[in-house]
Image: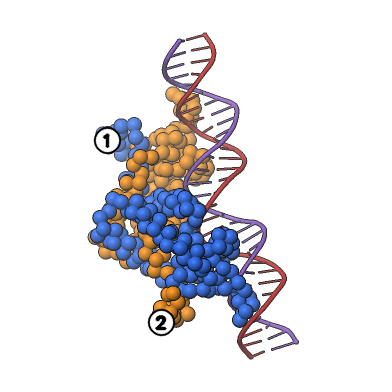
Chain colours: A orange, B blue, C red, D purple
Amino acid sequence: MNRAEAADLPDDGVLKTPERLRRRASRLLSQLSMRSGRLITEGLARVDARKWHYAVLASLHEYGPGSQAELSQRSGIYRSDMVGVLNELAERDLVERAPDPADRRRNVITISAQGRRHLRRLDKVLDDLHDELLAPLSPAERDQFVQLLTRLLDHHTRGS
Amino acid sequence: MNRAEAADLPDDGVLKTPERLRRRASRLLSQLSMRSGRLITEGLARVDARKWHYAVLASLHEYGPGSQAELSQRSGIYRSDMVGVLNELAERDLVERAPDPADRRRNVITISAQGRRHLRRLDKVLDDLHDELLAPLSPAERDQFVQLLTRLLDHHTRGS
DNA sequence: CCGACACCGTTAGTGTGACTAACGTTAGTC
DNA sequence: GACTAACGTTAGTCACACTAACGGTGTCGG
């Protein structure tokens, strides 16, 4: 059917993926998200960090100390996974985990001075990585991109 | 530090994620990609299909029959995973898998009439799902969004 | 006061998607 | 005819989102 068409194209040994697929926003999203994820993960690994570390440290810095459950909700990390993340952060002395005297079910997590320093560093690293990620876009386009993503995400987050 | 600021905000019981995190394109991407993935996966499941099925069927339809290795490259599915996908497609008689007489290492995969019908159906389903995914955007914005994604992905795909 | 219920942190496990390693088989190449 | 490379296939790894269930703790209604 499209066999003839395909034969006309300059099929110079490179196997192209179908247009249909290429155009689907869902596919573009997942592919780009994968690339982006790799970029970020590898970049952070170079400074002995992970995405989740950043999420937790940022939460602590912006909203102050909190329980693990609070951090979970703010950072979007499941409380079951939060345990391990906090272990890693505590190992590195970036965070202090102490039982809450007011409610003995909870742990109060506090960011340390070293944690704040680390957070600043991560911010810098992430800025650079995002520069790489968004390299082909002009500043205006980057804003536009972020705004579009935000609107879409907000739309699909409402009601859950 | 930002504790005071945070306290000023209308913290009406809802735990917000830090602005820093919210703004990061990488996070927006991964979050949205997750939502999108779920939407698509669930939508396709309703018609007994998966994303991979669509990718393979679309490849076959646009470029004609091919070996599993060709399909792999075109659809971005690893050849190790392609085996299972083709098993599923063959089970449903959407595809025919026959040894290539010209090169007995290969299988030649051909889309069936039923497969073509199924592909049309999937296209319709995906159109609807993308309507849902991109609901908050105007047609112009959707184009813009797809174009931005494409440019970014192209940039990060070149050289690999 | 106490029993029902909800929340806390933690452990273990599930499912999926991207990816690697290795195998036997078959084709080309010198 | 030996070497190398590609093919399909099987098995397994790794990270990530997510669920289930546990003991310990607070809260609230009767």
Q: Residue A5's x, y, as percent?
A: 41, 78
Q: Residue at x 47, y 53 (%)?
A: B47
**B154 or A130, nearer to the observer:** B154
A138 versus A73 height, above or below: below
Marker disc for residue A8: 2
Q: Residue at x 51, y 67 (%)?
A: B112
Helix, strand, or loop for circle 1?
loop
A87 versus A36 height, above or below: above
Among the 4 quarters of the image, the one containing residue B88: bottom right
Among the 4 quarters of the image, the one containing residue A40: bottom left
Measure the alpha-carbon separation of dots 1 and 2.
61 Å
Q: Residue at x 39, y 48 (%)?
A: A119
| Residue C23 as seen in the image, left or right of residue A51 | right
Amino acid type at mark 2? Asp
Mark 1 or 2, closer to the camera? 2
**A151 or A23, nearer to the observer:** A23
Tell which subunit mark 1 falls on. Answer: B
Helix, strand, or loop for circle 2?
helix
Q: Is residue B65 visible?
A: yes
